[in-house]
Amino acid sequence: MDQQDPALGRLIDQVRHARNDRRALDIRGGGTKVFYGGQPTGEPLDVTGLSGVSSYEPTELVVTVRAGTKLSELEALLAEQGQCLPFEPPRFAPGGTVGGMVAAGLAGPARANVGGVRDHLLGVTLLNGRGEVLSFGGQVAKNVAGYDVSRLMAGSLGILGVLCEVSLKVLPANRATATLAFDWDESRSLEQLKLWASQPLSINASSWHHGRLYVRLAGAASAVHAARVKLGGDVPAHGEAEAMWLRLRDHGEDFFLPDASALAGGDRLWRLSVPAASASVKLPGDQWIEWHGAQRWWRTTAAAPEVRDAAGRAGGHATLMRGADRSDGVFAPVSDVLMRIHRGLKQAFDPACIFNPGRLYAEL
Amino acid sequence: MSGMITSPSPDASTAASRPEPQEHQERQERRERQAEVTGALGAILPSRSILFRHEDTVAYECDALTAYRTPPLVVVLPETEAQVAAILALCHRMGVPVVSRGAGTGLSGGATPHRDGVILSLAKFDKILKIDAAACTAVVQCGVRNVAISEAAAPYGLYYAPDPSSQIACTIGGNVAENSGGVHCLKYGLTLHNVLRVRGFMADGEPVEFGSEALDAAGLDLISIVVGSEGMLAVTVEVTVKLTPKPQLARCIMASFDDIESAGAAVASVIARGIIPAGLELMDKAMTAAVERFVRADYDLNAAAILLCESDGTPEEVAEEIARMEQVLSEAGASRLEVSRDEAQRLKFWSGRKNAFPASGGISADYMCMDSTIPRKRLAEMLRAIQQMEIQYGLRCVNVFHAGDGNLHPLILFDAEDADELRRCELFGADILETSVRLGGTVTGEHGVGVEKLNSMCVQFSPEERSQFQAVKHAFDPLGLLNPGKVIPTLHRCAEYGKMHVHRGMLPFPELPRF
């Protein structure tokens, strides 16, 4: 990207000053995910001045966009060309940016079938803690020149640097979709999802809550039709089903505690990421299952150790998604050796520790 | 015999030009160091697992980049994970570099030995530990061959999707190191997209696990940076891979084009129509002729370029997609279209493409295989530039491309016995890589940097970016003992390479051949 850009120049100045004074910076896009991760601290570093699409050619299946660009604008542009970000990044509120989408690393209902943010991240331009503007990866899907630093930024919550520009792999939108519904309990749903996953069906998302399983099919019209005949089930109205998947993606349902007032009761929302084939996870409270069993949301008053143990026993980990009390930490602790690598990487990118301190782990 | 040769030799092979007394002393010192390291290894390994005599270690002097040979100090072949950990801990204490090695099929010298280092051969870790059909995963040791995973998964209707051309020999550990692709990665992704968990050891022998059997792991996404790190960040011993349901049907279209521009444009048109083929490959006329002699795949020898365009999925899906592909390719000016009738014919179509490298060995004493990636829309431009370079450097070049993802494999034909041909071939190769970077691409799409493309890394990355890479390396391996000297060139090396370029640019009559 153009290093002479005045908006970038201002960010570089602010980073250099912060480094010299060892002052913390709170990297800010649209501020729609402030609730996610450790409590933000420090002087705001506003990246929304870096906005706009740098290049987009549909035949390349790649879009390069500055990090402060609104996600809704990017997705509208892609839709005009019949393309999309297949991993369905959530929009918890209007105004979220592409940089925030990458830094949070969250993906929506289609994640299990199409991959997540990092799988579609081809390159980044990054402002590191020394105030240097660096580019890694690129605009091509196959690229093994040097370590894959760009993908490391997905889900890093801004602790390694300021994303300035990102290149994303995009795909044609699905030619056809259909949603099927089944009145099945948790164990039957998990069992059936497991069976379907090992067959070449066109399943692209699933959602189970309160005894009802929804399955979305996507792909060529003929394949969707064939799978529909094979799977059976009820067929909810198309518009209703589409709205349901969007509400799920954006946590619009009350289950997901979207309003601060809902948190007052002491309930917290946890995201359990476990192997899809794991058996039922038992916790007090209410559950919503996505990703064919690989993502299990729990709305519970259980204490953090209980939730983390349950996730760990299933072979996964638990993240506190929303809760009034974040004092137990948001992300599951990692092993000593992995924390040593985390500290080493923090030192490598941000030696003065100015970026988003405590947002991922208290010690980083 | 095919050899793949580029660029100035790495530092290790310059000993021959030194004055004799110094050379004698160095040999003596090396023998002493070898005895010291071998002795220490003897305390933790049975003698059958330690090779140090020249006749035993010669097979390990290079990988598939045969032009670079370095005798390793010692080769070790551990049989247990405890032995791997002990070897690493010992080398860490003694400051001995460690180069991990799988099948040695890498094309960029990623497993080229370090003169003062140990080759850690992981060949004995060749067990498939678990195929979990219900979870669509397999847990395998690092030395398991790529194709062996798909064979073991076949009874369950599953397979491992990435299929590098060396898949019958290359190991999953090597695939993880290189983030290998293959002809189907446009639709099914690279190694990274098909690997869930990597277990292994840090440089000091401490056990470590990256990723998990869930779809993500807590903290930074470290598996993303470990995959493709060419053995410089950690040593892999076990991998959990994702298995994919085998498509019920696959059919392939062979399309002929009268000029290379229309073939390049056809690739863009297919994508523009929202089609993601399972494979989309391009071969130019010279390549087609070479492979046709080699395998008799019934290729159209009159075409300036042929495209192989594959669809897979359910029979309904394939029928729908093949019809759309045929329409797009006709509109793009294909002079002939042939759709595979059955599986035998489909495999025949592919047999030529899959044998492109050995077929090139049949028409030339040696060839150098390039591996850059460029944006798809620049394909025709790149091909014209390569034609120009053939004249400029006086050498022939045949072309196969993973056209769907812009990954080029131009094969420059030369005779390694002819010093000037070798020199021109190196310049030709460097020119292709630099042109690729200029067109918005990268110097390596899937073969890795290794030692082969160290100089080209100076062109693609700024000094600050290369320093950042070094800092990443330091975060994992503070003593720099895992595969030192690969992937990231030193600032000094780039400065020297830069000078050579300026020097060449200043030569009078640069178009004249020089001897």
Image (cartoon, rainbow, N blue to C red):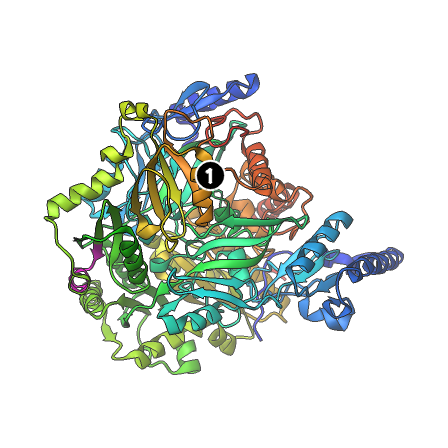
Whether residue A84 is visible here, answered yes or no, is: yes
Q: Residue at x 58, y 47 (%)?
A: B501
- Which chain is mark 1 on? A
Q: What secondary structure do most residues of the magenta stretch adopt?
A: helix
Query: What is the number of callouts on the image?
Result: 1
Q: Identify the image quadrant of residue A30.
A: top left
Res A136 visible:
no
Dividing the picture into quadrants, the one containing residue A227 is: bottom left
Q: Residue at x 25, y 46 (%)?
A: A84
In the figure, A184 relative to A39: above or below? Answer: below
Q: Residue furthest left?
A: A237
Q: Residues within 10 Å of mark 1 (few under 14, many from 20)?
A: many
Q: Magenta stretch?
A: A217-227
Give the percent coordinates (x, y) of residue B177.
54, 56
Residue position marked by numbered label 1 in the rendering: A135
Using the image as rendered, state which of residue A2 and residue B249 is in the foreground. B249
Residue depicted at x 48% and y 58%? B240
Q: Is residue B28 left or right of residue B75?
A: right
Q: Is residue A70 left or right of residue B319?
A: right
Q: Is residue A225 magenta?
A: yes
- Of A6 and A164, nearer the camera is A164
A133 inside magenta stretch? no
Residue B133, image x, y percentages:
39, 65
**Foreground: B33 or A318?**
A318
Q: Is residue A363 left or right of residue B324?
A: right
Q: Residue at x 69, y 53 (%)?
A: B88
Query: Hey, what amino acid is under mark 1?
Result: Ser
Mark 1, secondary structure of its residue: strand
Residue A76, how many percent across, how many down?
21, 38
- Give the percent coordinates (x, y) of residue A311: 43, 44
The image shows residue B312, relative to residue B195, as above or below, that is below
